[in-house]
Structures are given as C-alpha cells and as structure tokens.
Image (cartoon, helix red, strand yellow):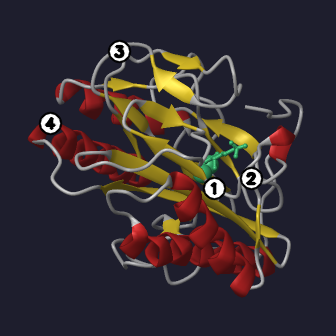
C-alpha cells in the first residue's frame, strides 16, 4: 500500500543498519511492554495508549499516527480483522486473538514488528492458526539470503500455509523499511507473478504474513477506510519481523527473543 513503484531499493550502510536495528528493538520491546495488559475487559484504545507511552518514554515516535491519515499509534487487529484494525472502544473478550503492530521512528530510523496475543482460553482452532502463521514467518525468513529472489519468500510461505489448510492474504504485503516506512521492494506472502529482485546484503525489509482460516480475500471497512477483515468472517493471524539480508544468514533486527542466530557481519 502507498508504495512508490518507481522508487529504488535503498541499500543500507553499517550506520543505517545499526540505527534501524535500534528502532526495531524498541518496537519489539513495545510489544513486550503491552503484553501484561492484554486481558478480557481491556479496550484496544487502552493497549494503544500503553504502546504510545512506551514509545514516547523511549524517545521514539509512532510511524502510523498520521500516516496517510491513519489516526492511532498502533494497529490492533482482533479475530477476523486481517490488519490495520484501529484501536478504539472494543473491549477484549475471553477467546479473542489479536495482532498488535508497532512501527517506531527512533533517531529518524523506522522499525516495524507485530505479534499475536490471546485472551483467556482460546480454541485449538485459533491456537493452530497462530502457530502456523508464526511458522510461515520463519519459513519466509529462511528464504532470505544473497542471490535468492524475493518472490521465493511467498512461494514457500504459501506452500506451507496451504498444506495446513489455510489461505494467504495477497492484498497486503511486506515492504522495504528503514529510512522510510514503506520502501521497495514489495514482499509477497504468496506466489507472485514476477519473482522480483535478487536479494543482496544491505537490503532491509519486513516479512508479515497474514494467514486466514477461511478464504484469502479481504474487505476494507467502508466507514473507516482502514480496517481490513476476512470476507467470510473467519479468523486471521499475522506475525511481522524487520530483517536485513547479509552475506550469510538473515539478520532479524526485531528479534529480541534470540529466536534467530546473529550473523558475524553484514558485508
Ligand atoms: N505497520 C503496518 C505494516 O506492517 C502498516 C500500518 S500502516 C497504517 O506495514 F497506516 F495502517 F498504520
Ligand atoms: Co510492515
Ligand atoms: Co507493521
């Protein structure tokens, strides 16, 4: 969305990579900070405000507030909302699943990450969807090495998602990130028409698969023009990391849980 297709991929130097890493770490820490507040009875507005305060306390700003008119500091997408859920009066209920998506601007660098939360007891059906979606992100990350085509990220994600009986949202994509919010290249989570550019060290982008329990199609709310829901009302899940391609293994800049190994150097 809102991508300038004529723009070029911005390869980052060491100083920029370090800055984008610090911003990504802060975005990931924001998700940790809000976690204890995610429970039944709490409004999504309240969760947004906890994130906002944490960002401000850490000398960062939200990249979403005012972005093409977007009204809040986070996106919070509950149950059948695929992405771009606007925090508001909705009170979480037992059994809800939700994605919180945080994009920070720290020292003018952008970091973008999101994760899933559950409220009370959720169904096995919901838990399995969440697990499979996290695996989709991991599978995508494993495709990130020099010389590979970016389109193969989506090819592999889609294979796995389908094998689990799920569909992949194709109307929203991952994106280059770092000096701006949405840069080239576009990162598809399903098989694209064109496999796109070859990956090279210094490329930084997000992978953020949105996986649906039912049909892949989405519909955007006619009243707020943002909230994207599944067309059939079934559940959707999403995880997102910001990563840097290196000469060796992918460097997951927003991984503060040490789930991924760290390369010894980028170039
Ligand atoms: N953070 C989202 C992403 O991962 C984008 C949100 S744009 C907004 O790309 F305007 F909805 F905030
Ligand atoms: Co993103
Ligand atoms: Co995001």
Label located before the other in sequence (3 or 2): 2
Crowding at mark 3 (Cα within 10 Å: few <14, some 14-19, many 20+)? some
* 3D distance between C-alphas at marks 1 and 3: 26 Å
Secondary structure under the numbered disc 2 in the rendered image: loop
Report whether the residue tagged 2 is closer than 8 Å to ligand 1. yes
**Is residue 53 shown left or right of residue 128?**
right
> Residue lying farthest right?
6
Question: Where in the figure is residue 199, as x and y percent of width and height?
Answer: 61, 49
Residue shown at 61% from the left, 78% from the top:
26
Q: Quadrant of the C terminus?
A: bottom right
**Discs 4, 1 touching: Cβ within 8 Å:** no
Judging depth in this view, the residue of 257 and 9 nearest the camera is 257
Local crowd size for mark 1, using a 10 Å CA cut-off: few (<14), some (14–19), many (≥20): many
Q: Which residue is mark 3?
A: 215
Q: Which mark is residue 64?
A: 2
Q: Considering only order in the chain, which callout, 1 or 2, is on the residue closer to the N terminus?
A: 2
Left or right side of 72 for 207: left
Ligand 1: does it lie within 8 Å of the C-beta at label 1? no
Label drawn at residue 74: 1
Q: Which residue is mark 4?
A: 125
């Amino acid at each position: 969305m809102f991508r300038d297709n004529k723009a070029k991929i911005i390869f980052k130097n060491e100083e920029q990579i370090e800055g984008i890493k610090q911003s990504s770490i802060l975005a990931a820490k924001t998700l940790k900070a809000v976690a204890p507040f995610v429970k039944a009875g709490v409004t999504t507005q309240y969760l947004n405000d906890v994130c906002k305060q944490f960002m401000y306390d850490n000398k960062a700003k939200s990249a979403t507030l005012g972005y093409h008119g977007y009204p809040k500091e986070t996106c919070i997408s509950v149950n059948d909302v695929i992405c771009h859920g606007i925090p508001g009066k909705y009170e979480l209920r037992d059994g809800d699943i939700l994605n919180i998506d945080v994009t920070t601007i720290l020292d003018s660098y952008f970091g973008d990450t999101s994760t899933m939360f559950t409220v009370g007891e959720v169904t096995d059906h919901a838990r399995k969807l969440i697990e499979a979606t996290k695996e989709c992100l991991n599978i995508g990350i494993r495709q990130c090495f020099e010389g590979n085509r970016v389109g193969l990220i989506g090819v592999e994600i889609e294979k796995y998602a389908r094998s689990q009986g799920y569909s992949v949202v194709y109307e929203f994509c991952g994106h280059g990130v770092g000096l701006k919010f949405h840069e080239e290249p576009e990162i598809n989570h399903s098989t694209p028409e064109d496999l796109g550019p070859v990956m090279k060290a210094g490329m930084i982008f997000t992978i953020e698969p949105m996986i649906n329990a039912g049909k892949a199609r989405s519909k955007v709310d006619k009243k707020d023009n943002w909230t994207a829901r599944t067309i059939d009302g079934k559940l959707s899940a999403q995880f997102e990391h910001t990563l840097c391609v290196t000469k060796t293994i992918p460097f997951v800049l927003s991984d503060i849980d040490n789930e991924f190994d760290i390369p010894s150097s980028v170039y």
